[in-house]
Image: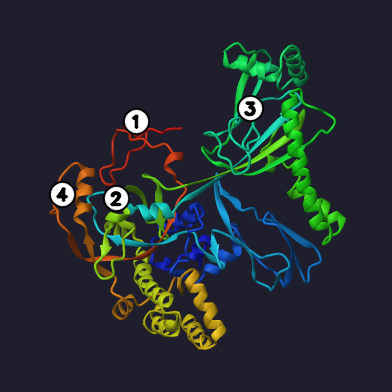
Amino acid sequence: MITSINLSGIPFISQTDSTRLQMSSKQVQQSLTTPNCDIPYVCSEEYNNLSYNSHMGILFAKDNGKVHFNDGNIIIIGYDNIKTLKTYKISPFKKCSANYASKLRFSLPQNTIFKKYDIIYEYDNFINGIPTFGYNTQVAYMPFFSFNHEDAIVVSENFINTTQVQYIDRVYVIIQEYTILQKYYNDIQNSFQYFPGVGQKIDEDVICSSFIPKNMQYLKNSNPSGIKSNIKNILKNMNVSDLINMEHQGNSKLIKNKIKSKIKNGYINGFKIHRLKKNINLLDKELQKVLDQLCTNYGEYVMNKFDELKNIFNQEFIHKTIKEHYVYTDNSKERGNLDLRDAVYILEFEVIKEDISAMGEKYANRYAGKGVISCIIPDDLRITTVQDQTPIDYINNPFSVFSRMNLGQISEMVIAKNVKRCSDIIKENPEETQEQIKWLNNNIIRYLNSPNYTKRINNLIIQLDDENFRNQFIDDVQKHNLYIEAPSFSEINLRNIIKHGVNPQEDLFIKKELIEYMEDMMKVKSSYTKKDTIIKNIFCSSMYIQKLFKITSKIITARDLGNLKSISQQPVRGRAVDGGSKLG
């Protein structure tokens, strides 16, 4: 029995310690996806549970129907047997957890006729309905100059660049009648002077900069009209630019307030402006002019959407859709509990940033074999296999498997090596597709103790006689990769898989330049001689690795001195025994 939906995507869970499986379930939720995510070479046969019950970014059709509208922001579908239409947000970037985002991978075009269980849309977390929250990575188990001791891992630059992370943030700016904004982006071409335009980079984390009177700050919550009156008096004898120039000289009567995003050095991915009160003008006439122009432009955008919809849907549905998805709403969850008292305009910014991984960031396989990056090897110095020069992107500690009792990863790697071999051959020689699937079924799948799956593969081999089906199958493998569905609980015959399949052990080639590079990092000499070296019989294969949301730049780490437990060498608890201290 699988007690967690997240565990549905993990094969061989009967070969992994129960405590580790609890961690694995949580780590699936913590994984950060990118467009580079892969279909695992080895999926669990229960993965459909995760696909059909996931809120991670996929929608399956509940019945036959049609896509009536899709503009890349929302999609409207109708089912043949259900009279009401369904509207879903499909923004290019979707917030998944905290400030992390998932990117839209696919959505059905407008006027598409779909069938029951077809995929309407999916984000990075899925490819063709298959959970994809990690990367097929070439892994070797070996000690590496002490850089992969305990929970440390060694990775390549290629792996770092592949596993990028996407940040997203929405910033709301309230504009009152008395609001004064500095022209913070005055020197940036095509910006709106007071704030950046779509596609432009923000300065550090600042969206815009506003001012309020120094001695009137206490009136902000109790009497906004007092601020308005005070600013009117200040502006009576000077314009806004003169006032802001005085602020730079230290003589201003204003306090500067920078409105910031949670993301630094991101760019504006989306922008909306909403005018709540049409009969009120701002005291700052220049700002009023800019906002009026933006309102006109965005109003035209909304009206164009209205015109697109009016030929397809009735007026009541159009008004509801426009209000919910293109016009600012009073939903506090959507707007971040903003105080809208005295608000004339609301500016809504979507900030996006993509960033590569760094030292200290956390990764894990599907069996909670987690680790933190301790060393990044340049791509030109990577260790490679002797037989076919396959570069190794991830080096793990071999002792971590036994101490954590998660042997499922060994089964995955042994099988994945054979699946990857067949996948690579099909990509290079499509005419060998049927032959490779037969070989995989006879030498690997038959020993998974899953008779129903073996029969399905036999039926697949027969279907490959059909040219159209075969071309579609090859196209899927070319775009992504081959994969098989392995059981979660059956006792697989690993001995026969190793006997009939590809040898999971490889001889690895280490360049002398890598040895010199590592000695320079350690500042000590190693036991290796400074010449090209071959290490024999290292267990290595492809393993599915996921990036976790423990990002180095977002967390605080510290080392403390204190008493340790004699067995586990972990800090003791409690002040009475000088236990470890807490931060936060």
- Residue sitting at x 61%, y 21%: 256
Tell which circle, 3 or 1, labels the residue nearer the N-terminal end: 3
In this figure, which residue is indicated by the disc labeled 4?
526
The Cα–Cα distance between marks 2 and 1, rounded to whole angstroms, is: 29 Å
Residue 553 or 455: which is nearer the viewer? 553
Looking at the picture, how far across and down is residue 85, in whole percent?
78, 62
As drawn, 517 above or below 365: above
Say which element carries label 4. loop
Q: Residue furthest right?
A: 315
Residue under numbered circle 1? 576
Q: Is residue 386 above or below residue 548?
A: below
Amino acid type of disc 4?
Ser
Mark 3 crowd level (few <14, some 14–19, many ≥20, 10 Å Cα): some
Q: Does the residue at mark 4 contact the one at mark 3 (Cβ under 8 Å)?
A: no
In this view, the mark in front (3 or 1): 3
| Amino acid of disc 3 | Lys
Which badge, 4 or 2, comes first in the chain's sequence? 2
Horizontal and vertical percent for residue 429?
41, 79
Query: In the figure, is residue 356 to the left or right of 317?
Result: left
Q: Amino acid at mark 1?
A: Ala
Q: Mark 2 highlights which residue?
A: 150
Query: In 3D space, how far apart are the residues under numbered discs 4 and 3 (Cα atoms)?
Result: 58 Å
Of the two numbered discs 4 and 2 in the rendering, the one whose residue sits closer to the viewer: 4
Cα gap from disc 2 to disc 3, whole angstroms: 52 Å
Tell me which label, 2 or 1, sits earlier in the chain. Answer: 2
Residue 459 % position (x, y): 51, 86
Residue positioned 73% across, 38% down in the render: 294
Q: Earlier in the sequence, mark 4 or mark 1?
A: 4
In the picture of the structure, the residue carrying the numbered disc 3 is 183
Viewer-nearest of labels 4 and 3? Answer: 3
Q: Amino acid at mark 2?
A: Glu
Mark closer to the observer (2, 3): 3
